[in-house]
Image (cartoon, coloured by chain):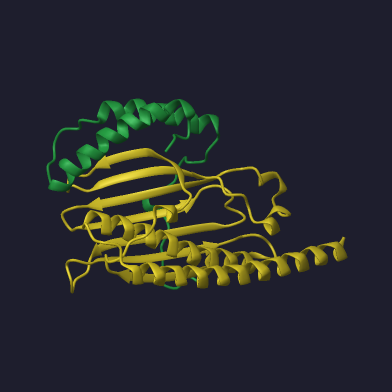
Chain colours: A green, B yellow
Amino acid sequence: MNSVGEACTELKREYDQCFNRWFAEKFLKGESGGDPCGQLFKRYQLCVQKAIKEKDIPIEGLEFMGASKAKTENSS
Amino acid sequence: AVSAGSGLAGTQGTAPRSSRPSWQRPQPAGRDVTADHKLLSRRLLTKTNRMPRWAERFFPANVAHSVYILEDSIVDPKNRTMTTFTWNINHARLMVVEERCVYRVNPENSNWTEVKREAWVSSSLFGVSRAVQEFGLARFKSNVTKSTKGFEYVLAKMQGEAPSKTLVETAKEATEKAKETALAATEKAKDLASKAATKKKQYV
């Protein structure tokens, strides 16, 4: 899959590869400590943030997991 | 807003690769591991599907725009759960669809994965919000069968299971049914949209 910024696609591929390995071999096995993909992620994130700005994608100030919303079982 | 809840359990069955939803370009906008070993992620997805025809008349300027979607997730390997919250961040006046999924181990059979899927569809489009919400809900239901098939395919592959013919057929049937529902809702929305347009003309 390509990145939202065409220029970030290669950075994304490198990061994804690193992440998938860490996720399967370390994280899911309960191993903590160390962030082997941190550098790759930072580079990739900077590139993506630039693309988000250029394309004017409104991601600012959105709470994680829609935390601000009190969800009820029947919100009709 | 109208809402839908659906649950499913089981890891049997498989689905063809082609049933993957048409999401494109996932991007992590953030990623973090908490002190209690949960992985938090935020990804940005772009969907390039065109708007339904009947909606174009309300948003002529938006027709060419992509839909941007955020997907927040928490993977908790200690409690063996995964929770996702997904919603569109533009075209919000036309329609917002929010979805929350909780994946966990079925308490009665630990070989099964259970999903609780909830969705909220809302629209603030004056005059036709109800029709838009009905349309969104029907479309959501039809898309859920696709995502379920994709999910089952991945699980079956991970567990090295052979494709189950019956389940594929059942999924097909469900897709057909959902398509019909979506079609009916589209017709309804079209009808309401044209009525709303007529009304507007009369007042001008």
Name the one closer to the observer, A62 or B70.
B70
- Residue B107 falls in image quadrant: bottom left
Q: Position of residue B60 (x, y in %)?
A: 72, 48
The answer, for residue B21, to whether it is visible in the render is yes
Left or right: residue B74 compared with residue B141: left
Measured as percent of width and height from the top left, residue B120 is found at: 48, 64
Residue A38 image offset from top left, x and y in percent: 25, 30
Residue at 25% x, 33% y: name it.
Answer: A18
Which residue is located at x 27 percent, y 68 percent?
B10
Up the image or down, B44 lies above or below B146; here it is above
For the image, the number of numbered tags is 0
The C terminus of chain B - image quarter: bottom right
Q: In x, y percent, where is residue B114?
A: 27, 66
Task: Say which residue appears at 82% left-offset and 66% top-offset.
Answer: B198
Closer to the camera in the image, B19 or A54: B19
**Residue A35's quadrant in the figure?**
top left
Residue B179 appears left or right of A25: right
- Is A22 positioned to the left or the right of B73 in the image? left
Q: Is residue A67 visible?
A: no
